[in-house]
Amino acid sequence: MQPGGHPARPTPGYIVDRKLALLAILEALPLRRLSLLLIAALLLSATPAVAREPHLRLSARAAIVEDGQGNILFAENPNLRLPNASTTKVLTALVTIDNAALQDVVTISPYAASMPPTRLGVRPGETYTVLELLYAILLASDNDAAVALAEHVAGSTRRFADLMNAKARALGCDNTHFVTPNGLPAKGHFTTVHDLALIMRAAAQNPVFVAIAQTRSVDLVWPNHHRPHHVTSLNRLLARYPTPLLGKTGFTYAAGRCYVAEAEGTGLTVAMLGSRDLWGDARRLIDFGMKASRATTLARSALW
C-alpha cells in the first residue's frame, strides 16, 4: 500500500532466474552435443538475474510458477497480499488432517448449515465423517462442510483460524492471515501467490490430501446419518491436461478467480489470484512451467 492508502502499482511479469529463462530456448536450437554441453555449463553456472518475459500475458493480479525444487520460474506480484477465496480450503484440509481422524464423526451445527453457496447442503443434526467433509471441501468447494470441519476440530471457526495461521507460519508463509475456513470475504483474510504455493507444496506431500485431490467424483452415502450426495471436482485440469493437476479453485467477487495446483509427479507448482480468465491463465502458467522444466532437464543431462 502506498502512502495515502493507494494500492501499490502491479509489477510486470518476470522470470526470476535468467539461467532458467535462457535454458527454455535450448530445445529449439539445432546444436551439436558439444555445443549444447558448453552452453548448458555456462548457463547453469551463471549468476541469477531478473529477465523480463514479454510473451506470458495474464489477466491475474498475481501469479507464480515454481519447479520441483521450489525455484521460482516466473512471478508477477508474488508478495502482493490479496483475498484468495476457496483456495483457503487447501490449508483447511491440512489443519483438519493434522488434528482429526478421518473416521471421526462430525455433527452439523445450525451455523455450519447456514453457510451460503457453494454448499453441500448439510442440515443441522446430520452426521458425517471427517473424510466425507474433506471430499466436499476439496472437490466441490462446499462452504458449509468447511465450517463443520472447523467447528469439529477447534470448537469454533475463530479458534480454527488460529490453527490455520500457526500452520501457515510453520510452512514459512510470512504474508498470510486467514479468518475463515472457507475463504468467504472477511476483513484481514489474505495471502500471496508465493505463500499459497508453499501451502500447496506441503499439501502435495500429504498422502491423504493427494488421494482426495486425485478424485474426480465421489458418492457420499451413509444411511441413517445423512442424505446421499454426489460430489464432483471443480478442478478441470485434473482431467483436461496431459499431466493431471492436483489443485483447488476459488472465486468471490472480491477475490476474482483463483487457483493453486501442483502437476502430479513433477513438483511443478502454479498459483494465481485475481484472475479474469481462470483456465486460460492456468494453462499459460503450467505450459510455461513445463517447457522451462524440460529445458532445464535437457541442459543438465547434457553435462553428464
Image (cartoon, grey):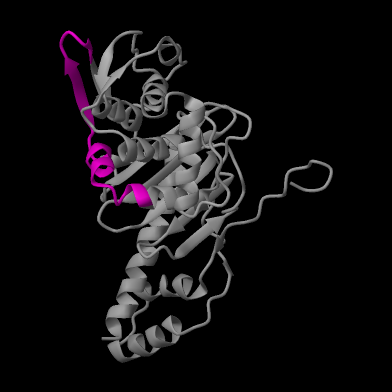
Q: List x then y, in percent, for residue 134.
A: 30, 30
* 278 in relation to 111, above or below: below
* 4 in relation to 291, above or below: above
Q: List x then y, in percent, for residue 189.
A: 58, 35
Residue drawn 73% across the image and 43% down it: 7
Pick the quarter of the image with the C terminus: bottom left
Q: Is residue 167 left or right of residue 37?
A: right
Asked whether 86 or 91 is in front, the reply is 91
Mark yes or no: residue 183 visible: no
Answer with the quarter of the image where residue 218 lies.
top left
Q: List x then y, in percent, for residue 168.
A: 47, 46
Query: Within the magenta stretch, is there residue 300?
Result: no
Q: Is residue 298 left or right of residue 255?
A: left
Q: Is residue 261 left or right of residue 223?
A: right
Query: Within the magenta stretch, is there residue 220?
Result: yes
Asked whether 231 or 31 is in front, the reply is 231
Q: Is residue 76 left or right of residue 103?
A: right
Answer with the quarter of the image where residue 26 lies.
bottom left
Q: Residue furthest toward the left? A: 223
Asked whether 220 or 231 is in front, the reply is 220
Mark yes or no: residue 179 visible: yes
Residue drawn 57% across the image and 39% down it: 190
Residue drawn 35% across the image and 12% down it: 121
Q: Residue furthest toward the right? A: 4
Residue drawn 34% across the image and 14% down it: 108
Q: List x then y, in percent, for residue 86.
A: 45, 32
**How many discs mark residues in the rendered view?**
0
Asked whether 135 or 250 is in front, the reply is 135
The region drawn magenta spans 202-228
Answer with the quarter of the image where residue 246 lies.
top left
* 239 in relation to 75, above or below: above
* 121 in relation to 101, above or below: above
